[in-house]
Image: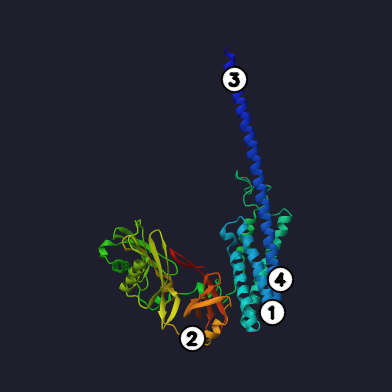
Amino acid sequence: MKKRPAVRIITFLSAALLVVGIFAVKNTRKAAALELYARANTQHAFDELVTSVSELSNDLEKSQYLSDPALESALCTQIFGRAMIAQMAVGTLPYAAQELEQTATFVAKVGDYANTLARAVGGAGGYSEEELENLKDLARTASIMKLNLQDMQSRVASGELSLEEVYSMAGEGAEGEGQPPMAGDAFQTIEEEFPELPTLIYDGPFSETLTEQKALYLQGREPVNEDQALEAAARFLGTEPSRMRSAGEREGDVPCWICSGRVHGGEYTVTVTKQGGEIWSVICDRPVGEQSYSVRQGLAMAEDYVRSWGIKDLEESYHTLSGGVLLVNFQHSENGVRCYPDMIKVGVALDNGNLMSYDAQGYINAHTERAIPPVEVSTEEAQNKLSRSLTVEEHAMAIIPSQGGEERLCHEFLCQSEEGDRYLLYVNAVTGAEEKILILLEDDTGTLTI
């Protein structure tokens, strides 16, 4: 009788071991399948990168020898497409950012520049001398990049180089005896030997005119020390400097002092520019209670705030309500022209009317004395550029930022479609070109543009 419990225990243990073994086999097979999938995905992304960069290089070489604007525009569009494919391939490869940084930057730069040229070259009657030189520089860099990647591809095919960064979830695959070196090291070598990227001055998001832009509102202003920054933060919040304390500093394009303090029932963090002592941003961490004020009242309070800070000639453009906080966007208005780059955002709590947030980044970066160009295209001429299926409700003059940080004087048309949807359309008041279209999303919480 005593043997039965022992037999049962052995039987149960055997069954448990069998189940564990089955799960182990299944997990091993699953890990192997995932590893195989990862390898195939990496190989596909790498081959896609080599192919797209090779075609990109060939197209850039061709672009130097075209003379027909239509063909030039078509080829630039094709180059843009090649660059987008290369960007997606770079994003799929399992390597650290520093191993592909310059590669990613280059293909993004080429794609953006080609997209800009595709839109402009037809109307300009062909490439300018500067644009042609830019294309030659890009072609030379792309050619070197193509040769390096093709060499890597050949080494991978021969087994001299391994694409996998990690062979398995168990940590196998680290370089060892008998194993080929990793492609990550090869990419790092290519990055270290990467030729200097050409400097392009053009209107696009990767333009140096944007990345090198300074805070125009602070030009010529004197630096402030930490104590002065605390005084500026206290003055902005309407409290005593003794209520504020230093919370460090922030470097970057616009270095700032960081101040904090408990004011009006909330903990405020205020960043003050080291040059000029201007308030860059404010944020309050206080939970917002039940709404006591209407949106209309909140708008009036936001306007009172900006007036009390001494900021003149601001005009409310749109607002949104979320979590009991009304976020109001103001832009500078100059001689009746709306200057959208000079934007300030103010957040007001609708439970007690206190300030919850403030963002003057756009205003500080862009606000300056402007020489607004004369209007060359009349309102009627600009309106004729619009689709006949749209009805114009309002018109204004506006300065809008382009993707590259340049400014465009435009006719702004608020329009409605036959279906009742509303849009903002911008027509260049100097060239007559359509610059931008925005969709207005309007509901009980406010208005957004996309």
> Residue at the spot x=64%, y=80% of the render?
121
At mark 3, the secondary structure is helix
Q: List the residue tagged with mark 2.
A: 373
Q: List the residue tagged with mark 3.
A: 8
> Residue at the spot x=62%, y=77% of the render?
119
Find the distance from the CA under tag 1 to the CA under tag 4: 19 Å
Find the distance from the CA under tag 3 to the CA under tag 1: 85 Å
Q: Can you say whether 192 is above or below 389 in the image? A: above
Q: Is residue 112 left or right of residue 178?
A: left
> Residue at the spot x=28%, y=60% of the render?
264
Within the image, what quadrant is residue 101 found in?
bottom right
Q: List the residue tagged with mark 4.
A: 58
At mark 2, the secondary structure is loop
Find the distance from the CA under tag 2 to the CA under tag 3: 94 Å
Residue type of the residue flagged with mark 1: Ala
Find the distance from the CA under tag 3 to the CA under tag 4: 74 Å
Query: Which residue is at the front of the view, 438 or 278?
Result: 438
Q: Are marks 2 and 3 in contact (CB under 8 Å)?
A: no
Q: Crowdedness of circle 3 by 10 Å Cα count: few (<14), some, many (20+)?
A: few
Sooner in the amino-acid sequence: mark 2 or mark 3: 3
Residue 398 x/y as whole percent: 47, 79
Q: Crowdedness of circle 4 by 10 Å Cα count: few (<14), some, many (20+)?
A: some
- The label shown at residue 70 is 1
Sooner in the amino-acid sequence: mark 2 or mark 4: 4
Residue projecting furthest to the top: 1
- Of the two numbered discs 2 and 3 in the rendering, the one whose residue sits closer to the viewer: 2
Residue type of the residue flagged with mark 3: Arg
- The label shown at residue 256 is none
Residue 76 x/y as whole percent: 66, 74
